[in-house]
Image (cartoon, grey):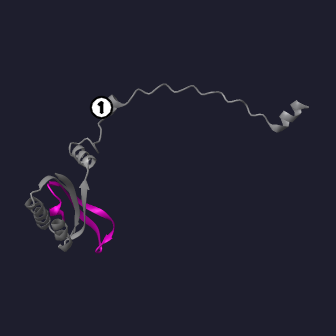
Amino acid sequence: MRNYEVTYIVDPVLSDGELKGISTTYQDLIKSGDSKIVHVDKMGLKQLAYPIKKRTTGVYECIEFTTPNGAIIDQLELALRRDERIMRFLTVSLDKFGVKYNEDKRNGLIGKKRTEEESKKEAPKAAAPAPAKAAPAPVEKAEAKAEEE
């Protein structure tokens, strides 16, 4: 089984019903090719780095799936290109490290904010500060010449 994820940006002017319809459309398309959806991440409305089609925001969604062969990818990308509601999309093949990262992220091991108790348990005890060393007094050049003579 090969692992993939497709992330796409939808036009933000669409209603919630249309956004759900788009999501189910592409999930059904992926399932039709003997593929299994692992996780759907609806990231929501986000600011774009640069304007796309005169829009500065977009609704992000990421679908992670497995497939026995990559035949469904061509159909999925063709459907995404033809859909005018989709502003951008990116399909990525995941290696074992990408799959592990996504799994850890779903389980809360990555990007998790630590509580005070956890940080106290994990933080090593701080060593006592080292005493400050006394610096030698600077010797002026004129005094140094006088001592030499």
- Res. 21 image quadrant: bottom left
Give the residues drawn in magenta, as a range: 44-73
The answer to whether residue 43 is visible is no
Answer left or right for 122 relative to 99.
Answer: right
Residue at image location 87% in from the left, 30% down from the top: 147
Quadrant where the C terminus is found in the figure: top right
Query: Was residue 33 drawn as part of the magenta stretch in this picture?
Result: no
Q: Pointer 1: residues within 10 angstroms few (<14), some, or many (20+)?
A: few
Residue at image location 28% in from the left, 66% down from the top: 57
Query: Was residue 58 drawn as part of the magenta stretch in this picture?
Result: yes
Answer left or right for 17 relative to 125.
Answer: left
Q: Which residue is mark 1?
A: 117
Q: Is residue 105 above or below residue 90?
A: above
Answer left or right for 141 relative to 118.
Answer: right
Residue at image location 73% in from the left, 31% down from the top: 137
Element type at marker 1? helix
Place of residue 128 in the rendered image (x, y in percent of width and height, measured from the top left): 49, 25
Q: Is residue 80 above or below residue 135?
A: below
- Res. 56 image quadrant: bottom left
Q: Magenta stretch mostly in which secondary structure?
A: strand
The answer to whether residue 7 is visible is yes
| Type of the residue with mark 1 | Glu
Residue at image location 25% in from the left, 47% down from the top: 96
